[in-house]
């Protein structure tokens, strides 16, 4: 499986550095992963591009919630793509739907054109589309390079049957990137059954709260970050199949 590409979804500069240290092939950089991910700050993009040696793709998502964007959201997305390009990103990750649950082909195509020559991934907005097989053809029409999907299930493991069908239908026209709930213990089974050539995981672990003093106003909700040891374990399992 030396040809399998492993992308790590990193929610901070620290997570991106840890992902590269663990052996990731590519980074999807975002913020607020607990909310499904939004676009990271320009400073985070700039510093990650300066410090890392592997490709960095930037999540272009102006807010949490659904993927039906108004004119203000759309303008912000275009500007964020241009900022990511100017700061050295290798790609962007985005997704737009219509109110009917179809891929917004027209506006996605416009964003793909704005992004070039960067690579473009259509993210898990795909998993909210009403007809995945139609959505696949629509994403291909936009010119995007790949689709990140869990097979419209809660995890890639549960969505393997649909992902297998998507891989067959896609052929060499677009890459299917399997993501959501991928772990060391299931990554090989997902690859074998679906036939995907790329996999995506956050490899996150809870970060210990280093505060000695906790205010009564603090929620004390823990945050997570990419763990290099989890990344390394997945990489090791993939490479063990060579």
Image: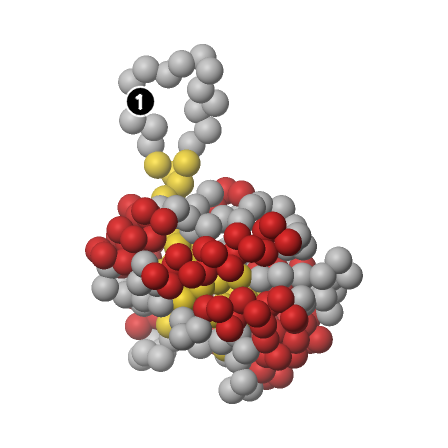
- Residue at left offset 46%, top offset 29%: 221
Horizontal side, residue 181 vs residue 229: left or right: right
In the foreground, 85 or 214: 85
Which of the 4 quarters of the picture holds residue 135? bottom right
Q: Position of residue 128 (x, y in %)?
A: 67, 59
User: Which residue lies most toward the bottom here?
Assistant: 172
Residue bearing mark 1: 211
Q: Residue 170 placed where, x, y %? A: 58, 82
Residue appearing at x 35%, y 67% in the figure = 90
* Residue 54 seen by the camera: yes
In the image, residue 214 lies at what x, y percent?
37, 16
State the image quarter where residue 101 is shown: bottom right
Is 114 above or below relative to 20? below
Question: Is residue 133 placed above or below 236 in the rendered structure?
Answer: below
Q: Which residue: 53% across, 43% down?
A: 35
- Residue at (41% x, 48% y) in the render: 40
Q: Residue furthest right?
A: 100
Q: Is residue 84 above or below residue 214?
A: below
Q: Nearer the viewer, residue 7 or 13?
A: 13
Is 92 situated left or right of 61 in this image? left
Q: Element at badge 1?
A: loop
Q: Does residue 229 appear in the picture of this structure? A: no
Q: Report crowding for label 1: few under 14, some 14 to 19, many 20 or more residues within 10 A (C-alpha).
A: few
Q: How is the image coloured?
A: secondary structure
Q: From the image, which quarter does the C terminus lie in?
A: bottom left
Residue 230 shown left or right of residue 103 in the figure? left
Which image quarter holds the N terminus? bottom left
Q: Between residues 204 and 240, which one lies in front from this camera angle?
A: 204
**Front residue (pair 30, 43):** 43
Residue 155 picture location, percent across and down: 57, 58
């Amino acid at each position: 499986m030396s040809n399998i590409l492993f992308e790590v979804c990193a929610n901070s500069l620290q997570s991106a550095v840890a992902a590269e240290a663990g052996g990731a092939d590519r980074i999807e950089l975002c913020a607020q992963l607990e909310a499904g991910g939004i676009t990271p700050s320009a400073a985070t993009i700039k510093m990650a591009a300066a410090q890392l040696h592997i490709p960095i793709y930037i999540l272009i998502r102006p807010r949490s919630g659904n993927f039906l964007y108004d004119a203000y959201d759309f303008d912000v997305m275009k500007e964020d793509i241009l900022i990511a390009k100017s700061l050295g990103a290798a790609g962007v990750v985005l997704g737009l739907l219509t109110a009917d649950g179809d891929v917004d082909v027209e506006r996605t195509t416009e964003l793909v054109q704005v992004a070039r020559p960067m690579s473009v991934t259509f993210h898990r907005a795909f998993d909210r589309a009403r007809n995945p097989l139609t959505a696949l053809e629509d994403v291909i029409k936009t010119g995007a390079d790949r689709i990140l999907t869990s097979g419209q299930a809660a995890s890639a493991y549960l969505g393997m049957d649909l992902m297998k069908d998507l891989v067959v239908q896609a052929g060499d026209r677009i890459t299917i990137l399997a993501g959501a709930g991928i772990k060391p213990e299931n990554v090989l089974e997902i690859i074998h059954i679906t036939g995907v050539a790329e996999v995506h995981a956050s490899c996150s672990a809870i970060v210990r709260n280093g505060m000695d003093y906790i205010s009564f106003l603090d929620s004390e909700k823990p945050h997570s970050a990419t763990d290099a040891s989890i990344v390394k374990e997945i990489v090791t399992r993939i490479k063990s199949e060579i």
